[in-house]
């Protein structure tokens, strides 16, 4: 006899597991928030348990995790490699690789920058030299590949391509910065064929976000010159809000945060932050300044009306400081200087801050004071990679290795 109760239990359990995955940059909703089971509030004296670790190649691309598999995008010698590993123990599942000749013009890392995106049964990556690739999530078989520099005249920029592809249904949206109206391009997820092209702006180092605002499904792309909101079906621009530094040697790096009908954007280089409210087809500025929050590339997180993020320049003496500000006003509630943070995630009432020196901090997500809960050294230095948090396991990498750390 068919057991309805058992079926519902299995169904709900599968939903719970999927909710704990981290299939793209900044998690399921691209907002840096973990929706899985509660994490431990205290760690052992020697630090949380390292489940496994593995040597990796070069690159600033963080991992993605879904259905017990971890996708690692890195470079070894003259090849960009998409590795699929068992997320529980790090054993190899499959590998796809292709040749690359990218050389960073400033002498930094030559590996890929963009976090892989897992959607449907497909993994989509964008290499440092602009190679857009789609492979089968099950076995790594190649589905299609596009050279965006050759096909769209896309410019390599300061530090190569860094946009993590955004997948909406059967559409892949990428901030390419190409010529002839190919600033933002949408591709068919199955075939790679172009669905639409939009804007003439150069690419940024930010990855797009997506949300339904005022009944409209919109992609929010923080390009080189500002924030564009586009219809995901045809690429029609709803609005294009100018926002960039006056100096040329600058980037927009953080992903836009969509909170209801409000959009928060931030950049460094004497630029700051702006909170917009979308009413109708035009954004109204709620507040805008260079004093509250200046995200160079690490995206802030939001909870209960407050933003927590890394303020300042990672490449300046003293590094960044962790801040809490009021979303509605931009008022600074507290600030912890000299943190040298690399990225920040939110898990329940905890902020997980990964520093550039490989230290993982657990900080209470509360607006009235900075309270450090735990700290542990889990990696080496020179971190710029986005971490992932799936099923209670924190995945992060530096220039030499990736680690899986249990926070359960």
Image: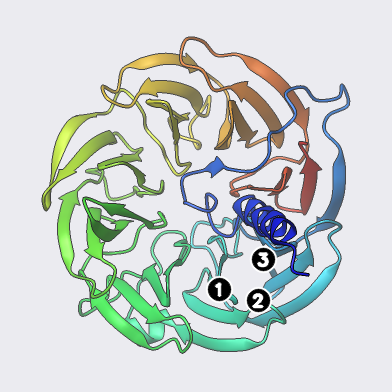
The N terminus: image quadrant: bottom right
Query: Do the residues under discs 1 and 2 have CB atoms within 8 angstroms?
Result: yes
The residues bearing labels 2 and 3 have C-alpha atoms spaced at a distance of 17 Å
Give the x, y percent position of residue 374.
72, 22
What label does residue 137 carry, if any? 2
**SS at mark 3 in the image:** strand
Question: Closer to the camera, 28 or 287?
Answer: 28
Which is closer to the viewer, label 1 or label 2? 1
Query: Do the residues under discs 1 and 3 have CB atoms within 8 angstroms?
Result: no
**SS at mark 2 in the image:** loop
Query: Residue 223, can we see it?
Result: no
The earlier-in-sequence mark between 1 and 3 is 3
Pointer 3: what residue? Answer: 74
The residues bearing labels 1 and 3 have C-alpha atoms spaced at a distance of 22 Å
Pointer 1: what residue? Answer: 120
From the viewer's perspective, tell me whether residue 361 is left or right of residue 187: right
- Dividing the picture into quadrants, the one containing residue 339 is top right
Give the x, y percent position of residue 353.
61, 32
- Dividing the picture into quadrants, the one containing residue 331 is top left
Question: Closer to the camera, 341 or 164?
Answer: 164
Give the x, y percent position of residue 17.
68, 54
- In percent of the image, x 22 and y 46: which residue is there? 243
């Amino acid at each position: 006899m068919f057991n309805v109760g058992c079926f519902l239990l299995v169904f709900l359990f599968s939903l719970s597991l999927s909710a704990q995955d981290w299939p793209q940059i900044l998690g399921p909703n691209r907002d840096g928030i973990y929706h899985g089971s509660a994490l431990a509030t205290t760690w052992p004296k020697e630090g949380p348990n390292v489940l496994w670790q593995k040597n990796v190649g070069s690159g600033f691309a963080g991992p993605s995790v879904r259905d017990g598999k971890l996708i690692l995008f890195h470079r070894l010698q003259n090849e960009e490699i998409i590795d699929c590993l068992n997320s529980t123990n790090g054993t190899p599942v499959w590998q796809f690789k292709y040749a690359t000749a990218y050389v960073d013009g400033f002498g930094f890392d030559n590996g890929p920058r963009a976090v892989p995106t897992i959607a449907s049964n497909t993994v989509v990556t964008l290499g440092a030299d602009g190679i857009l690739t789609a492979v089968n999530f099950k076995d790594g078989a190649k589905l299609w590949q596009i050279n965006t520099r050759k096909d769209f005249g896309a410019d390599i920029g300061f530090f190569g391509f860094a946009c993590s592809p955004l997948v909406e249904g059967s559409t892949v949206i990428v901030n390419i910065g190409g010529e002839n109206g190919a600033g933002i391009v949408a591709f068919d997820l199955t075939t790679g064929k172009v669905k639409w092209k939009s804007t003439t702006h150069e690419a940024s180092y930010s990855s797009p976000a997506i949300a339904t605002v005022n009944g409209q499904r919109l992609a929010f792309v923080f390009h080189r010159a500002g924030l564009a909101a586009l219809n995901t079906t045809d690429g029609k621009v709803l609005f294009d809000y100018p926002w960039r530094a006056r100096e040329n040697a600058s980037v927009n790096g953080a992903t836009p945060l969509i909170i209801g009908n409000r959009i928060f954007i931030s950049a460094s280089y004497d630029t700051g932050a702006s909170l917009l409210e979308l009413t109708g087809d035009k954004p109204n500025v709620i507040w805008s300044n260079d004093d509250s929050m200046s995200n160079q590339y690490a995206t802030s997180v939001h909870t209960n009306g407050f933003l927590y993020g890394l303020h300042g320049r990672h490449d300046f003496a003293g590094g960044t400081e962790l801040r809490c500000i009021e979303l509605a006003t931009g008022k600074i509630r507290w600030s912890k200087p000299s943190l040298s943070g690399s990225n920040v995630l939110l898990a329940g009432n905890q902020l997980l801050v990964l520093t550039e020196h490989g230290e993982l901090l657990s900080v209470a997500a509360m607006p009235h004071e900075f309270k450090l809960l735990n700290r542990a050294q889990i990696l080496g230095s020179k971190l710029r990679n986005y971490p992932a948090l799936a099923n209670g396991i924190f995945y992060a990498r530096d220039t030499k290795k990736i680690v899986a750390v249990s926070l359960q």
